[in-house]
Structure formats: structure tokens, C-alpha cells
Amino acid sequence: MTFTIIFLIAFIASFGLRHWLSQRQIRYVAQHRDRVPPEFAEKVSLAEHQKAADYTIAKLRLGILENGVSAVILIAFTLLGGLEILNIALLQLLGEGIPQQMALIISIVIISGIIDIPFSWYKQFYLEERFGFNRMTKKLFFSDMIKGIGVGGAIGTPLLWIILTLMAQAGDLWWLWAWGVLTAFSLLMQWIYPSFIAPLFNKFQALEEGPLKTQIEALLTRCDFASQGLFIMDGSKRSAHGNAFFAGMGKAKQIVFFDTLIEKLNPDEVEAVLAHELGHYKRNHIRKRLLATFALSFGMFALLGWISTQVWFYNDLGVMPNLNGYNGGLALALFMLVSPVFSFFFTPLASLASRKHEYEADGFAAEKSSSKDLISALVKLYQDNASTLTPDPIYTAFYSSHPPAPLRIANLQRLS
């Protein structure tokens, strides 16, 4: 029962901390709702500022509900015996072996996905609709869902089978082989996703010849960045939010702009936003994040390799393992359910590193493009995306991957 107590303490602490942070953010944003921060007063209207506050609060309240439901589901699967019931039912249906263990994990994924559908629907067709961001049709919603299930099944099922087979047949160091497989798969996906998966969901058109393309190509030359192409993605068919990103690795790198971003920003601002994204690449942020992910997954697999052999891990979480048989899927399922409770407490470290990278990318953009244009672009994006200009400092320190708007703009002004 020792691990049961440890798990419950971590569970209560993580759930309580999530709730407390969300409530802090709601109160802080609401308290600053009626006054635009002085540094934005000339660019952001009170109506826009209040819309951002209301949008932020609405998302937080939905998040609180989602966290509550997730907490109930976690306890139901573990301490209340849900996973044990599901495991026994599948054993009776399929017998022992890898197919049964695969079915266990797939069943958990399906159950979790079904529970998530109402939240996704509400967010898309009520919350996003209410604030003028939704452009997705109900037909597209279900089309995306079906495609996502198909792609996830086609890719995830063979990968799951390989990992469970390694757990069964590769000896005590199965976790090292499994980590190697997952690492290789992650690198392969960097190439597969932009070429084969993303086009299933969106249309990608080459950026047309003209002043914008000429300006961007000049920036790429200044930054010594080789790209396989410049593309515009039809993000507007789902949302009014704008973005830009890299796809692919090595010589296969592609630069992708949402059409909504091109619509909202002038060419100089688009250049500045791209310069920021290029900063992430030139400052090795992408490589560092990838290496950090691989290192973290190595540690997680090593931990799983040890903990999967401990009977208390199963018993203290409401499951009875097969003491003389194969428990690979059961161990993996329990680990997937429980590990986020503990890893949640490391969130501020990842957030801090991400904010540091954002400042460095802003510095690169100021050097290679224009800090003034980046400021102008960011203000427009804050307005159009209804991003709050007054986040709670503690909430920001814990969660935010980007610096709060006032600090980020002030830093860019110093770089002007």
C-alpha cells in the first residue's frame, strides 16, 4: 500500500495545484479586464482587451472541467479497479498474449478518445464560435476525427506491437531496444509527417512569386538557411488563428505559413515572424528540444523497465498482474496513466527553458530583420488571437512557453 499512498499524495497535489493555478489566472485576468496595460493603450482597444480576458477565462473554466473529468477517469482506471476489470474481460475474450495486451491499450485509448469528444465539440462549436474563431464545419470535424483514427491506427498499432514484442522477447534490456525503436520512429516521423500525413488534413500551396516571396528569400539568404520550399496552408478552414512553422529535417526543411497569418500581417511583419522562427533553428533550439525529448524518454523507458517487474506497482494501483505470464501491455497502460501525475511537477522547468528560447529567437529576429516589425506583428497576433496581455505571474512561470506580452515587447524595444 506504500505506493498507493505516494500516488494519492502526488495525485491530490497535482490536481490541487492545477486548480489553484487556473483560479489564480482567472482572478488575475478578471481584475485587469477593465484597463488596457499602458504600453498597449495606443494599439489595443478596451473592447479587444476585454475580449481577450473573456476568452482566456472561458478556456480556463473549460480546462478546469476537463481536469476534473480526467482526475475521475484516472482514479476509476486505477484505484477503483477499472483497468483490472477491462484486463480480465479481454483475457476471457482473447486469452493471454500480445494481442490481448494490445487490445488493452487500444481500448484505453478509445475510451479516453470517446470521453474527449464532447469537450472537443464544445470547444470548437461553442467556445471558439462564441469568440469568432471557429471556421470548421461539423462535417470537417468528423472527417478530421476519422482520418486521425485511421492515421493513428496505421502508425500506432505496428509500433505498439513492436514495443510489446520487445517487452516479451528482448530480455531485461528490452526497454533499451524499445527506446531505440521509438527514437528512430520519431526521427522518421519528421520526414513522414510533412510529406504524407499533413496533406491528408490540409492543402499546401507554394508561395506565389511576388514581393513577399522575394523578401522572404532574401531573409533566408541573410540567415544562411536552406529550405526545400515556402508553402501556404489553408488553416482558415478550421480557425481564424494564425501561425507559421517548420516541417521536416535536414535538407527537406519546409517553411509553412497559415493563410490567416498572410492575411493579417504585412510583408515586413511576416518577415519578422519568420526571422523569429529561423532563430529557433539557428540557435539550435529544435535540436536541443529533440535531444532533451530523447533523454527524457530514455529515462522513462529505463524506469518502466524496472517498475514493470515490481508486483507492488500493479497491486498498489488496483491491478492483479499475471505472476507467471506476460504483463507488458498492463505495465505500459498503468505507466501511461500514472506517470503524468508525477511528471506534471517538472512543467515549470520546461516552461522556463522554452521562454528562454523565445527571448533568444526574438534577439535573432531583431538582428536579422526588425524588432519594430516583430513588435507590430506580435501586437496584431495578440489582438487577433485574443491573447491576454495581463497573465498571472505565477501561472506564467509555471505553464507559459512564451514570455508574457509586456515583458516580451519591452525586451524587443531594448533591442531596437
Image (cartoon, rainbow, N blue to C red):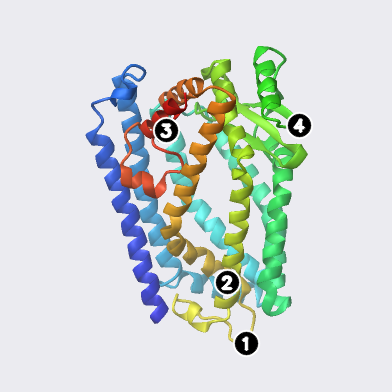
Is tag 4's residue or tag 2's residue first in the polypeptide sequence?
4
**Residue type at tag 2:** Leu
Q: Are the residues flagged by discs 1 and 2 in contact, CB closer than 8 Å? A: no
Is residue 386 something that shows in the picture?
no
Distance Cα–Cα, label 1 vs label 4: 54 Å
List x then y, in percent, for residue 369.
57, 23
Q: Residue 327, relative to residue 298: is it above or below?
A: below
Q: Which residue is mark 4?
A: 228
Q: Residue 118, relative to residue 294: is it above or below?
A: above
Is residue 119 something that shows in the picture?
yes
Q: Secondary structure at mark 4?
A: loop
List x then y, in percent, for residue 20.
29, 52
Distance Cα–Cα, label 1 vs label 3: 58 Å
Q: Which residue is mark 1?
A: 324
The nearer-to-camera label among 1 and 3 is 3
**Residue type at tag 1:** Asn
Please tell me which residue lies in front, 232 or 398: 398
Q: Which residue is mark 2?
A: 304
Label 1 crowd (10 A; few <14 / some 14-19 / many >=20): few
Distance Cα–Cα, label 1 vs label 2: 19 Å
Is tag 3's residue or tag 4's residue first in the polypeptide sequence?
4
The nearer-to-camera label among 1 and 4 is 4
Is tag 1's residue or tag 4's residue first in the polypeptide sequence?
4
Q: Which residue is mark 3?
A: 408
Is tag 1's residue or tag 3's residue first in the polypeptide sequence?
1
- Give the residue drawn at x 38%, y 61%: 72
